[in-house]
Amino acid sequence: MYDLVVVGGGAAGFFGAIHVADNRPDMKVAILEQGNKVLSKVRISGGGRCNVTHAEFNPAELVKAYPRGERELRGPFHTYQPRDTVEFFESRGVPLKVEEDGRMFPESDSSQTIIDCLMDSVITLGIHLIKNAPVVEIIPVESPTGGMIWEVKTKSDSYHCSNLLVATGSSQKMWNILKVLGHRIIDPVPSLFTFHIKDPRIDGIQGVSTHARVELVSRELPGKRLSGVIRTSSKRSAGLTTEGPLLITHWGMSGPAVLKLSSWGARILHDYNYRFRIRVNWTPDYHQEGMYAFLVKVKDVEVRRTVFRTCPLEIPKRLWRKLVQAAEITPDQKWAEVQKKQLQQLAGQLTSSEFLVEGKSPFKEEFVTAGGLDLKEINFKSFESKLHKGLYFAGEVLNIDAITGGYNFQNAWTGAYLAARAITESKN
């Protein structure tokens, strides 16, 4: 018999267990992990450095990173936010640092530092860590002393507890168990993923990275393919636009701009069967007409130089040359020789290049799903189920997900902390 059983040996599960045991040493706490390894996502996050959180300390701005959960997390972030996360780790001898894009990592640049911190706390606080214990059933039962307790069945054992914290992440098995308890599950779909694109304009220049604006244009209908010719900017847009670093890869496009679009458009792109068009503005400070006017001025100045070797913009030269060729300007053509139509085409390629996306790949470091436990069934002051007293949730088991940058971990820390606080207060 435990005061708290945590299902899931990940970030949220460990954090919740630690806060309960730390605040109430008299409470008996156990963590059940289905496999033989814990904190697996912590280990691989941020390329093995662990992107712990994000340096956004204004809750009103912080919630804007969550396509699902924005409204619900506003209150929780006023109680526990990135500043509190930093304090938690630094008070345990793990200082964090902020990178230029706001992501926060341990100064050691190693996820093992975070793992060691959490593991040491679990050991010091006497929390029972039980591995190879996949949960197969959760049953509310009457307590011999009155009230309800939870029976948590694994393949080989049964555990009883007065409080149950489910922090299993994106687990279809757990969602099926929660359905039996009457909870509604929003069907999960991939959230953070990269785009498969085959196009001569990006072929052979993998590794090129630049700041760009990416817009979801439309679904690609069966039997219709892009010709590679630039489309007019008047085409009706699907309304999703992101901006940030864009990375050209062997298989297409990645980077924060693409990952953010995949996150905000997770359900739309799933409905499109991951076959759709995007429009890329490689020079977000310009629109097509403004770019044309700028290129006309460049032509007047760079009369004798070739367009191919004269890049007047702050974009990678390899990308510039690809776009110049796409505008039907030859490598030996001088600015003085460029026709009006060619300049218009170049302006179009620079500000509104359309690409056909024909599939996705998961972003390995931050694989996330959109979907999970219906947020209407959760009390966000305590992260307790509205259907069952003593049943709590934290992390991605809920229908909450964020863009890349440490935000998904912050959701885990915040939910686990508030659940732990409610559990300890319920025992007073």
Image (spheres, rainbow, N blue to C red):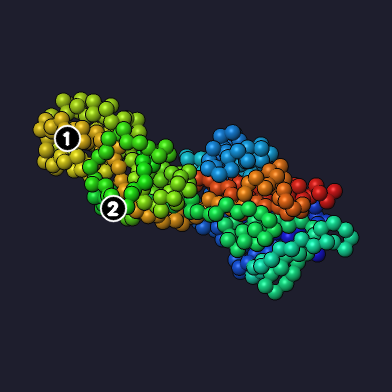
Q: Is residue 273 left or right of residue 164?
A: left
**Residue at the image point whose x is 63% and y is 46% from the top:** 375
Q: Is label 1 in a helix, a strand or a loop?
A: helix
**Residue at the image point whose x is 73% and y is 60% from the top:** 5
Q: Position of residue 352 (x, y in %)?
A: 30, 37
Q: What number is the disc on residue 188?
A: none
- Total marks shown come to 2
Residue underneath mark 2: 223
Q: Amino acid at mark 2?
A: Gly
Give me the C-alpha separation between circle 2 and circle 1.
29 Å
Would residue 393 be seen by someone viewing this image from the given angle?
Answer: yes
Q: Nearer the viewer, residue 109 or 156?
A: 156
Q: Position of residue 119 (x, y in %)?
A: 66, 59
Q: Position of residue 125 (x, y in %)?
A: 75, 58
Mark 2 or mark 1, whichever is nearer to me = 2
Q: Is residue 124 above or below residue 92?
A: below
Would residue 127 be seen by someone viewing this image from the given angle?
Answer: no
Q: Is residue 263 left or right of residue 127?
A: left
**Residue at the image point whose x is 25% and y is 40% from the top:** 230
Residue underneath mark 1: 342
Q: Amino acid at mark 1?
A: Gln
Q: Residues within 10 Å of mark 2 (few under 14, many from 20)?
A: few
Q: Nearer the viewer, residue 81 or 372?
A: 372
N-terminal label among 2 and 1: 2
